[in-house]
Image (cartoon, helix red, strand yellow):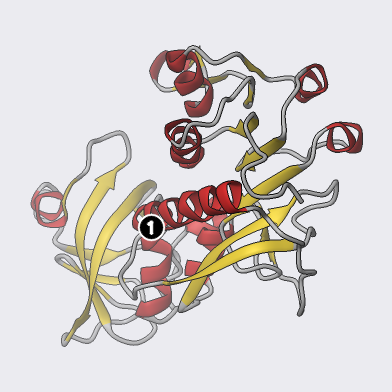
Amino acid sequence: MNPKGSIKRVVYMGTPEIAVPPLLGILEAGYEIPLVVSGQDKRRGRGSRLAPSPVKREAERLGINVTSDVNDVKAVTADIGVVVAFGKLVPSDVLNHLKMVNIHFSLLPRWRGAAPLERAILAGDQTTGVSIMELEETLDTGGVYHSVEIPIDTDETLKDLQEKCVITGTNALLKCLGEGFGEPIAQKGEATYAQKITSSDLEIKWHLPADEISRVVRIGRAWTTTAKNRLRIHSIRIGHPEVLNAGERSGVLVGTGDVSIELVKVQPEGRKIMSAQDWVNGLQGKSNGRLGHG
């Protein structure tokens, strides 16, 4: 597909913040982008005003024509389409009009789907990667042109891993655009699926081992309950020698299924992020208690 040096014009499709760096990388490498396709405006932030996606916002800033209708691709002349976290499947008639590739943030066929990095962290995977793959009408099933393995550090947050993967993915894409894609290699092995992360996935179950709880905290928006309110847990430390029952809290220490953990940064419902010690100090003498449902 596309011999070396033959690609000049690239249609770009992406929506969230993680899809902005590849867009910029393609432009900086000298390729022309006649069209960007991104998700529809959504209500965001305080006041719930309609706001563009990060990719749409960046495309408008750069003066690139942008649409939310994937069918507009059929009216554009381009050499290839690049898809990064677009958020929905591309129909077959659009794929028949323009060959497309996808930067997928896993080593396929492991973690096909919407949340590959989140699921890799939750599963305790030690490695992940990026795959430059042929886009098909079905979900993440296309052959792979190029892949790069990336280690997952034991204390690495989702944000840190995303930054690492998007840099690697952008470089891998630019290498393929410049040197040619070659022929895709069919995916081998059993596929696993990365379902979207739900609120239930993010609730801390204190009876689990501390390492599993840490994985939930590392992907962000982890929460538990105290009395009748939610408490977000933003960062923790593992391995305090004091032994507590699962969910039992003594100051900033909480028991788990094995070792106790120390709360570092928390966010009470309706309030800003604060140190766990400041939160405990504000409990009006209630220094101990329980978190969650066990």
Camera-side residue of 14 and 11: 11
**Residue at the image position 43 percent from the left and 75 percent from the top:** 212
Camera-side residue of 70 and 28: 28
Residue located beneath label 1 in the image: 164
| Residue type pointed to by label 1 | Lys
Work out whether 130 lies above or below 39.
Answer: below
Residue 284 coordinates in the image, percent (x, y):
10, 49
Quarter of the image for residue 106 reads: bottom right
Work out whether 115 lies above or below 272.
Answer: below
Image quarter (top left, top right, bottom left or bottom right) of the C terminus: bottom left
The answer to whether 107 appears left or right of 17 in the picture is right
Camera-side residue of 126 and 73: 73
Label 1 element class = helix
**Residue at the image position 52 percent from the left and 60 percent from the top:** 117
The answer to whether 115 appears left or right of 186 in the picture is left
Residue 273 coordinates in the image, percent (x, y):
22, 43
